[in-house]
Amino acid sequence: MAKNFNPNHVMHGNGGYAWWQGKQLATLQSVEAKVSGDFEDINVCGDPATYSIYNGYSGEGTLTWLKVDSTVLSELAEAYQTGIMPEISIVTAQKQKGTNKVERVVYSDITITEFMLAKFEKKAMTEEEVPFKFGNFEVLETI
């Protein structure tokens, strides 16, 4: 494996992008999205092993970007005040340096369970962070 290793192809956060409702988050700082399996333990008399059965999954993540406008805040505030939740989609992509390869995932059926109205401190850039849950995802491209 070391013979084929090219350090220029190691994935790096600088090649990461995210889109909220089709609009690129130009000041993106970080993305985290994960899927957690829902498994139920099964035990059978006479067998000391514990087995697992897959029941489904849940997805959650967080987007963090430098705040340059109030687009997301306005959208979420209106949704919470009216009770009409928007159909939100998020796309993440990470380019592999030195190749034309991209790892790209789209998340749908998104629920935003909390958001900040204000968070800032002196002598610091203001970041907007939105944790989210998703019902579905699709891996569009892999490297």
Image (cartoon, helix red, strand yellow):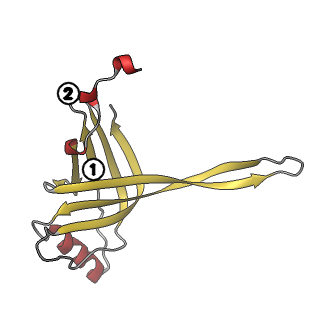
Provide the residue designation for mark 1: 91
Provide the residue designation for mark 2: 98
Outermost residue toward the top in this view: 3
Crowdedness near tag 1: few (<14), some (14–19) or many (≥20) residues, C-alpha within 10 Å: many
Residue at 32 percent across and 79 percent down: it is: 83
Which one is in front in this view, the residue at disc 2 or the one at disc 1?
Answer: 2
**Residue 133, quarter of picture:** bottom left
Residue at 34 percent across and 54 percent down: it is: 32
Q: Quadrant of the N terminus?
A: top left
From the viewer's perspective, tell me whether residue 128 is left or right of residue 57: left
**Spot occupied by residue 22 in the image (x, y as percentages of width and height):** 19, 53
Residue at 22 percent across and 79 percent down: it is: 117
In what element is the residue under mark 1?
Answer: strand
On screen, residue 12 above or below 79: above
Tag 2 and tag 1, C-beta contact below 8 Å:
no
Crowdedness near tag 2: few (<14), some (14–19) or many (≥20) residues, C-alpha within 10 Å: few
From the viewer's perspective, tell me whether residue 65 is left or right of residue 130: left
**Spot occupied by residue 26 in the image (x, y as percentages of width and height):** 13, 54
Residue at 23 percent across and 78 percent down: it is: 77
Outermost residue toward the right in this view: 46
Amino acid identity at mark 2: Gly
Q: What mark, if any, has residue 113 been given in the picture?
A: none
**Spot occupied by residue 128 in the image (x, y as percentages of width and height):** 21, 67
Q: CA distance from mark 2 to mark 1?
A: 22 Å
